[in-house]
Amino acid sequence: MIKILGFILTIGGGISLVMGVLGAFGSANVGLSPWALIILGVVFFFAGIGLLKYRKDTDTIDAENK
């Protein structure tokens, strides 16, 4: 479950980061402030990477613990 949440946060943060950068430096016009999207994208991206990197998945059942 934790790895699924980390994957969703990573993908969402990446999308938000790309949209924010395109809004701030490119020609893409989004409804929100592009700098807010950049900040949220960075936070969600690194939070998702941290969950994927350092957490063990709790949905697996070990055969040794039975």
Image (cartoon, grey):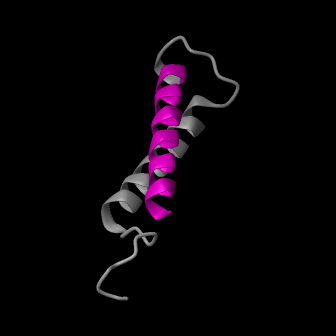
Q: Left or right: 49 with respect to 43?
A: left
Q: How many labels does the image show?
A: 0
Q: Quadrant of residue 42?
A: top left
Q: Left or right: 26 with respect to 32?
A: left
Residue nearer the viewer, 41 or 2 = 2
Against 21, residue 42 (above or below) is: below
What residue do we see at 48% from left, 51% from top? 43
Position of residue 64 measured from the top left corner of the image (x, y, whole percent) = 29, 86
Against 30, residue 54 (above or below) is: below
Q: Left or right: 35 with respect to 48?
A: right
Q: Residue furthest right?
A: 31
What residue do we see at 44% from left, 53% from top? 48
Q: Quadrant of residue 58?
A: bottom left
What residue do we see at 45% from left, 49% from top? 7
Q: Left or right: 39 with respect to 57?
A: right
Is residue 17 rendered magenta in the image?
A: yes
Residue nearer the viewer, 34 or 64 = 64
Position of residue 60 measured from the top left corner of the image (x, y, whole percent) = 40, 70
Against 48, residue 21 (above or below) is: above
Q: Which residue lies furthest to the bottom in this view?
A: 66
Is residue 21 rendered magenta in the image?
A: yes
Quadrant in the picture for the C terminus: bottom left
Residue nearer the viewer, 65 or 20 = 65
What residue do we see at 40% from left, 67% from top? 57
Magenta span: chief secondary structure = helix
Q: Which region shows up in magenta?
A: 1-23
Position of residue 63 measured from the top left corner of the image (x, y, whole percent) = 32, 80
Position of residue 9 measured from the top left corner of the image (x, y, whole percent) = 50, 49
Against 63, residue 8 (above or below) is: above
